[in-house]
Image (spheres, grey):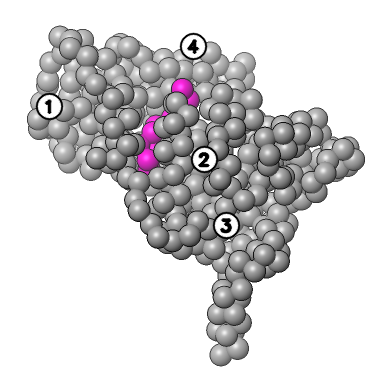
Amino acid sequence: MSILANYAMNDNIEPVMNSSKETITQKRINNAKASYNVRNVPLDIVSCVLTGDVQPNAGDLVLATVTKIGQHQRIELGSGRRAGLHLGDEIIVCFGSRYAPDQFEAFVPDSLESCHLVAAGGVAARSINRHSKMKRATEILPVGILADAQGQRININDWAIKPMATEQPRPFTVGVLGTSMNAGKTTTAAGIIYALKKQGLKVAAAKVTGTGAGLDRWKMVDAGADIVLDFTDAGLVSTFGVPLEQLELTLSCLMDHMSAIQPDVIVLEIADGLYQKETAALMASDVFKSTVDQIVFAAGESMGAKKGETLLEREGYSVLAVSGAINASPLAKREAQDVLKAPILQPKEVGKMIYDVLLSEQLITDKITQLTSVKSH
């Protein structure tokens, strides 16, 4: 059994409580709106729900009823479509925590009492804080935790990808970090992917940390990445509160599966900002440092851009370029460029810069020869 699986097993030990099992029909499961975060679970294994005095674990699948519409008026399905929510709708989501300065702070509840939908990708949690621009969180009432025919609760980690042995050398890897949520990290990552694909390269991408939702993943898919994974594929509905060792295992697992397709470049996005606890821990990690070759930093203004560059250099990283939301303001760019060492570039320009680095280091010589040969014929 993998180390990653062992972690999940330790986290998912069921407390001895006065819980009960209630049979549920497959028709009811099929009629429920199944969220993005449960997309990897074959729902035909559901046989019953656990109710009563049962304590949820992060990643447990739960059938819940929408009781009050708040901030989230839609739920993202596994296909990526955002389905409208109505009072009385039954949804299938995962228990998990959330850290989102622009939205909610929320935690896995300790019972099946009423809680909240805190992310469109399908996260059930107890919201304790919200940004002033956010409405109150949509309220949901758990029907029960989904379980199989043996009465064992179903968790997304049960269907997670596992670490795999690969003899392939680690591809050239770019890490995209930023000042905070909405700094433009995903837009930057997508622009890099697009530019590299236009040069004929094979590109893999992953979002390593964050809260389970597909929006960022779909942007990378739409940019042309040959494979896109995220931490939910590795069995985590959220990385908020996850120990560093498990984050490192998740990173390694994602890298294994991306490396297996032998891409020319891997693009990694790390959620939130450098001061966020899990991001800060990962940035200081020797595992992460040995995984990435270049860092691209996304920022919205000059002070954040400079501070980010300084923090990253202090950790031993070389910042290849600054990009992200700062590109929206020519004045902010000029102000920042006066104090930055790294150039401020549009995302696609960063992609071209990475391509030039690959050429200069002779990392894609064979690929260029192949492409030239194909074009000549």
Mark 2 and mark 4 lie on one chain; the one further toward the N terminus is 4
How crowded is the residue under tag 4: few (<14 C-alpha within 10 Å), some, or many (20+)?
few
How crowded is the residue under tag 2: few (<14 C-alpha within 10 Å), some, or many (20+)?
some
Mark 2 and mark 1 lie on one chain; the one further toward the N terminus is 1
Q: Which of marks 2 and 1 is in front?
A: 2
Depth order, front residue of 105/373: 373
Quarter of the view holding residue 368:
bottom right
**Quadrant of the snapshot with the C terminus:** bottom right
At 16% from the left and 28% from the top, the residue drawn is 152
Residue 278 visible to an observer of this rendering: yes
Say left or right for 264 vs 144: right
Q: Position of residue 1 (x, y in %)?
A: 24, 40
Residue with the most extreme bottom position: 377
Q: Where is residue 312 in the image (x, y as percent from the top left)?
A: 69, 36
Q: What residue type is labelled 2?
A: Val
Q: What stretch is highlighted in magenta?
A: 231-241
Residue 287: mark: 2
Would you name the residue on which mark 3 appears?
A: 172
Quarter of the view holding residue 73:
top left
Would you name the residue on which mark 4 appears?
A: 128
Q: Position of residue 85 (x, y in %)?
A: 39, 29
Residue 69 visible to an observer of this rendering: no
